[in-house]
Image: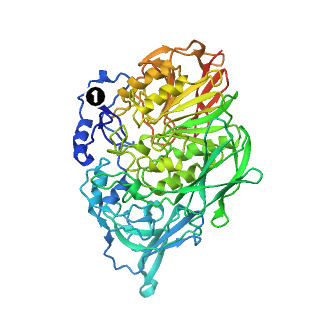
Amino acid sequence: MHNMLFRTSKTMFLHTSHSAKFFSLIIITPFLLLLSNSHALPLSSFPNVHFRSLSIPNNEHDIPHFRTLNRRRLHDCPSNNPYLQIIVNAVSPLPDEQYINVTVSGVTKPSDKYWVAMISPSHASVKYCPLHSLLYKETGDFSDLPLLCHYPVKAAYLKNDPEFLTCKKSECKKQGDGGKCMIKTCSASLTFHVINIRTDIEFVLFNNGFEAPCILNRTTPLKFANPNKPVYGHISSVDSEATSMRVTWVSGSNETQQVEYGNGKSVTSAAATFTQKDMCGGLVKSPAEDFGWHDPGYIHTAVITDLRPSEKFSYKYGSGAVGWSDDIEFRTPPAGGSDELTFLAFGDMGKAPRDSTVEHYIQPGSLSVVAAMADEVSTGKVDSIFHIGDISYATGFLVEWDYFLHLITPLASRLSYMTAIGNHERDYIDSGSVYITPDSGGECGVPYESYFQMPTSSKDKPWYSIEQGPVHFTVISTEHDWKLGSEQYKWMKSDMASVDRQRTPWLIFVGHRPMYTSAKSALISVDPVFVQFVEPLLLQNKVDLVLFGHVHNYERTCAMYRGKCMAKPMKDENGIDTYDNSNYTAPIQAVIGMAGFTLDNFSDKAPEWSLKRINKFGYTRIHATKEELKLEFVNSNTKKVEDSFRIMKT
């Protein structure tokens, strides 16, 4: 196959045949970056893709300033200040969640270069590691600078305290004759949101900013009261009957634990973990197997059975030895073939700090989206959730999975939380992914498949189908081979052809990378080869609705095929766009990657096939009966519906 350029979240890479032997990233990345700044391909080669200039502010291609701190020598600062202190005001040992106040005092000359990092584990090496500069080269950073040997979990400048630089909080350390203050020091206070990550933590005070940090002082280590505590439980469906559900949680212990549920029922968990050796790497170690590594503890999972569809149950997980979770109420989804379903769907959510600190790869919309969905889940009117790729954005910095799981607990512990894999979970050089990118930071799908065990046939084959209510979901991996004759292609073809449209009249196709987008982007958002091979299957099997993420906005199309509108909706009596699928023409497609990551702007002019474009954070609410499928885009900040359409069958 000829080479084809496509969009990634880091840089431009060559898309070759799946069996091709990949070059080392260290060798090919400079060449690929040159390609990314060329205009060698004619725009006519990509009729469903829109372009803009190569200026890319405020998106995932930027390298956060915080990440540059890992490129400098770390050493003790030359200081003769005897007054300098860093004090932690925290419950000790640490509970499972706490907002910790860190106070730095005794600063004689306030500066915007002072900052505090939260390190875990406390014994982690923060010495000079020059070879780690290669880790940034593989993600597109060509700074020839050394790195820290371990990545800090969080960091915050003292100037985040608005009273620091002006020294409003001052103390006189030495008085002269007449009571005049000869030495005045200043202080600052910062707040860190800390959750149970099992390993102890330490706060370190630096000077010289993120660019060239040196150590001024550090606290003593803080331990968690119960590092083995079972936490971050979430549930998922195992089949279409809705009589069994999988419960998954994290603990520092691999000892047997249980799920107690219903009226005295109990099931024992199986525990597993992954190590640095399970991560992907190359000539140099990836972030996941090196300075981004954090011990994941043990992932426990158990399948609870003898449930009934569309009913509420309570459960808790843990054991007498390690402790128990709270009692949690959850609701099973409706069984496949039943009359009605309401689910929430979105992509590209990730997480963001609940304090003023800086973390690796922040998704600014995630907090408002989770809060809005949690309010909706609490009404009891939602049956399930589908998160379609780019789940946590940990990308090799493993502690961020804990923070993500903590974030989604109000949702995922109460409803079936189903997922599809994305580029930031799976892609890595020479790892078997379709796309030759370092987007997973070396995770290669291992943490994702450990935390989110979907009803797939086996490991690293993350495609599956499931039925809920009147809907059949075909969930694919855009990151695994989907070409004609591949295992996944054969599965897609067989799965969609086997749908009983009397039992489940609606067929929804779900994946991460889209077939169509009118977003502005310096890099290509769509792989035309993917469209070439997979789109005909959608038409042949009369797919009603296609849901994709990857592009960070909301966009809805007409009923379309091969870049052309086959049919457009009519307005109903309420002015809502209504598609008539009794006379089927083609699938309606929606990009729903607006749940957290920095939003992507649209091109100035919408193509004919693009009927609605919204550049705001939110999620979609979808309600299905046997005769109608209704999708609403909900703005997570206002909770108002900003787009709505119906697909009808009579």
Please give the name of the residue rendered at 30% of the width and 66% of the height, measured from the top-left corner.
Answer: 128
| Farthest residue, direction top | 583
- Residue 179 appears left or right of 31: right
Residue in front for this viewpoint, 285 or 59: 285
Residue 233 higher or lower than 632, as above or below: below
Whether residue 353 appears in this view of the structure is: no
Identity of the residue drawn at 44% across and 36% down: 550
Q: Position of residue 122 (x, y in %)?
A: 45, 70
Q: In this picture, is 125 found above or below 178? A: above
State whether residue 370 appears in this view: yes
Q: Quadrant of residue 229?
A: bottom right
Q: Position of residue 634 (x, y in %)?
A: 59, 34
Residue furthest bottom as drawn? 177
**In this figure, what is the number of numbered marks?**
1
Q: Residues within 10 Å of mark 1 (few under 14, many from 20)?
A: few
Report helix, strand or loop for mark 1.
loop
Looking at the image, what colour scheme do you see?
rainbow
Q: Residue at x 47, y 75 (%)?
A: 220
* Screen quadrant of the C terminus: top right
Q: For this rendering, which residue is in front, 493 or 584?
A: 493
Q: Is residue 134 left or right of residue 162?
A: left
Q: Nearer the viewer, residue 171 or 391?
A: 391
Image location of residue 450, percent across then percent down? 50, 50
- Residue 169's place in the image compared with 403, above or below, is below
Q: Identify the residue position indicated by label 1 in the image.
A: 1
User: Quarter of the image containing the N terminus?
Assistant: top left
Tag 1: residue type?
Met
Q: Give the image quarter of residue 84.
A: bottom left
Q: Nearer the viewer, residue 461 or 182?
A: 461
Q: Position of residue 435 (x, y in %)?
A: 35, 38
